[in-house]
Amino acid sequence: MRHTRRKLGLTWSDALGATCSATPYLTGWARIESKKHFPTDVLIGIAIGNFFGEFVNNLFELNDVKFSAGPSIDGGAEVSMTIQF
């Protein structure tokens, strides 16, 4: 029977994910410690951030989401997103 050795350790992706996940929690803790926010404010903010993060992540996993950007008729710019259900 042949065994495959797997290298254990952090990849750059793992380190980036851990840093991005820890930053809001550490910021929230610092805001509570400095008496700038109540703990409930921070917990609600974390919950809202997690909800929208998952929502946007799920949007990008769909195959029927299309983004486009370009000039508009009045000389400005426009960005559109189309989702097919």
Image (tube, helix red, strand yellow):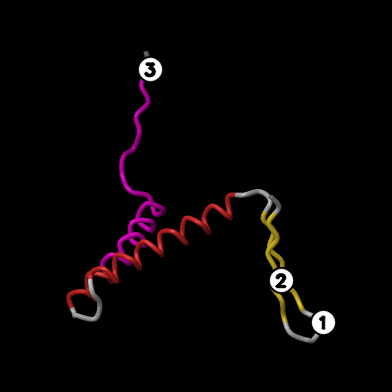
Dot 3 amino acid type: Arg
Q: SS for tag 3?
A: loop
Residue 73 got which mark? 1
* C-alpha span from label 3 to label 1: 65 Å
Q: SS for tag 1?
A: loop
At 39% across and 54% down in the image, what residue appears? 12
Return the residue nearer the eye: 2 or 13.
13
Q: Earlier in the sequence, mark 3 or mark 2?
A: 3
* C-alpha span from label 3 to label 2: 53 Å
Instruction: Measuring from the top left, give residue 81's x and y in whole percent.
Output: 68, 64
Q: Quadrant of residue 72?
A: bottom right
Crowd band around label 1 with a 10 angstrom C-alpha radius: few (<14), some (14–19), many (20+): few
Q: Which residues are magenta?
A: 3-27
Closer to the eye: label 3 or 1: 1
Instruction: Measuring from the top left, give residue 77's x and y in whole percent.
Output: 72, 80
At 71% across and 66% down in the image, what residue appears? 68
Contact between labelled residues 1 and 3, with CB atoms less than 8 Å apart: no
Return the residue nearer the eye: 85 or 8.
85
Q: Which residue is mark 3?
A: 2
Instruction: Measuring from the top left, give residue 23's x and y in whole percent.
Output: 32, 66
Q: SS for tag 2?
A: strand
Dot 1 amino acid type: Ile
Q: Which residue is mark 2?
A: 69
Q: Earlier in the sequence, mark 3 or mark 1?
A: 3
* C-alpha span from label 2 to label 1: 13 Å
Q: Quadrant of residue 76?
A: bottom right
